[in-house]
Amino acid sequence: MAISPRSDQREPLSGRRIFVVEDEYFLADDIGKACRALGADVAGPVGDLADALRILHDGSILDAAVLDVNIRSEMIFPVARELKARNIPFLFTTGYDKVTISPEFHDVLILEKPIDLPAMAHRLAALIADPQG
């Protein structure tokens, strides 16, 4: 008799709401799909800072976030600061040099584009399970 993996192993983001901020439409869609494939509900994706801040302030629960560092020529740091203040784990994606990351976020995982989407989704699950790890 084959043993099936537990549901939370197949869908480690099940029941979690992942906030996606990415201004490149197709990448945003792919990030959302990768998260949904692991059971997540996706907030967004949104492609500009104003929409990101609106979702951040709408009172809904967010369990983790994927933030593109540069959104339509604006840095994502105001959103990142608020997530950090709320102890919501997040990671950055960027096509730029890591030097562009503000020193206050030196401890945040940075994934360079092109992104390995399944690995990114699993890293989000790990961040949720152990935000310090």
Image (cartoon, rainbow, N blue to C red):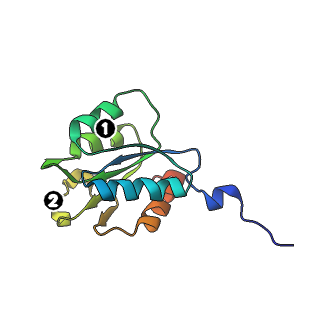
Badge 2 element: helix
Q: Residue furthest right?
A: 1
Local packing at callout 2 (Cα closer than 10 Å; few below 14, some 14-19, many 20+) is few
User: Image check: 44 left or right of 53?
Assistant: right
Local packing at callout 1 (Cα closer than 10 Å; few below 14, some 14-19, many 20+) is some
The first of marks 2 and 1 along the sequence is 1
User: Image check: 13 left or right of 4?
Assistant: left
Res 88 seen here = yes
Name the residue located 17 percent from the left edge and 48 percent from the top edge: 75
Name above or below for residue 129 compared with residue 99: above
Res 130 seen here = no
Percent position of residue 78, x then y: 23, 40
Percent position of residue 74, x then y: 14, 46
- Rendering quarter of residue 107: bottom left
- Name the residue beneath numbered marker 1: 82
Distance from Cα at disc 2 to Cα at disc 1: 19 Å
Q: Nearer the viewer, residue 9 or 107?
A: 9
User: Image check: 84 left or right of 70?
Assistant: right
- Give the amino acid at mark 1: Glu
- Name the residue beneath numbered marker 2: 100
User: Image check: 65 left or right of 67?
Assistant: right
Name the residue located 16 percent from the left edge and 48 percent from the top edge: 72
Percent position of residue 29, x then y: 37, 54
- Give the amino acid at mark 2: Thr
